Image (cartoon, rainbow, N blue to C red):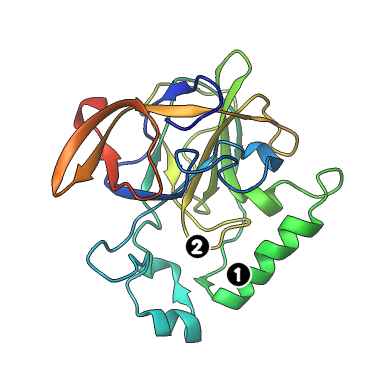
Amino acid sequence: MNTEDKPIIAAFPLRGEWLSPNTPGTKIPSHGTDRFGTRYAYDFIQVDWKRKGRPAYRVSFLHYLLFGVPLKEYCCWGQNVYAPCGGTVLRAEDGCEERPRTHFLSDLVNAYKNAHYFDPAKDDVQQVAGNYIILQCGKNVYAALVHLQKGSIFVTPGQKISKGDLLGSVGHSGNSFAPHLHFQLMDSSDIATANGIPCAFEKYEVCQNGVWIPVSNDIPTNKDKIRASPQSF
């Protein structure tokens, strides 16, 4: 477990098999920065484990480079997202358009622009977060689920929720290089100014040599093939 402080334990917010290319189990800060509360944040994608390079899309790599990829061709786009904790919905921001397809160069330009020119004092945080949900999970503990699919959010501000409740769907809104779920815990409900909080998952499984091994209260690395433990839902 590679964290600097004792992590808070949360439920794994997805179903099915996933990979975390950016995780505090491999490096901290997991996203290369402390901005926007991302110090201990996770990104989750689904990939084709049988194809070379483990692509997250169903088309060829050449097709991706030349033409881009429609969102429907991504393995995880539209997958359900579940509450990692019980608590209260503080924010549920929807309506942000998703770019209809990924394209390497345009997505790279978009990511560069947001990384270098986003000003939290004057710019809308949806420019970075896209469609997102913020939950209050405890005293000074807030969960953010980011880049959700437009029109997919099921909850509203002020709503009480339980761990495992359906929240929305994986999308490609905001500063997203490809469809994925960005998940983090933080010490404030304001993504623009929050500090990240370490988080581990209470029950999940890691596939080792074709066998699913139960794991408790731990943090996946960027090489782990993981899924929520059946006992967790």
Percent across and percent down for residue 171 are 48, 55
Cα–Cα gap, marks 2 and 1: 8 Å
> Which quarter of the rendering shows the N terminus?
top left
Q: Are marks 2 and 1 in contact (CB under 8 Å)?
A: yes
Residue visible at 57% across and 67% down in the picture = 99
Whether 108 is drawn above or below 81: the answer is below
Query: Which label belongs to residue 178?
Result: 2
Q: Secondary structure at mark 1?
A: helix
Judging depth in this view, the residue of 35 and 179 nearest the camera is: 35
Q: Tell me which residue sits at (56%, 37%) in the image.
A: 133
The part of the image, by quadrant, that contains residue 38 is top right
**Amino acid type, callout 2:** Ala
Q: Mark 2 packing: few (<14 Cα in 10 Å), some, or many (20+)?
A: many
Q: Residue at x 45, y 75 (%)?
A: 69
Mark seen at residue 8: none
Q: Earlier in the sequence, mark 2 or mark 1?
A: 1
Count of numbered circles in the view: 2
Towards the viewer: 30 or 190: 30
For the C terminus, give its image quadrant: top left
Q: Is residue 233 visible?
A: no
Asked if residue 124 lies left or right of residue 20, the reply is right
Reading the image, the residue beneath label 1 is 107
- Above or below, comparing residue 119 to residue 202 in the picture: below
Tell me if mark 1 has few (under 14), some (14-19) or many (20+) residues whose alpha carbon lies within 10 angstroms of its own.
some
Pinpoint residue 112: horizontal percent, then vertical percent. Answer: 70, 64
For this rendering, which residue is in front, 163 or 1? 1
Element assignment for label 2: loop
Q: Can the viewer see residue 131?
A: yes
Q: Is residue 225 left or right of residue 144?
A: left
Q: Give residue 143's position: percent from left, percent from top.
A: 55, 30
Lateral position of residue 138 relative to residue 206, left or right: right
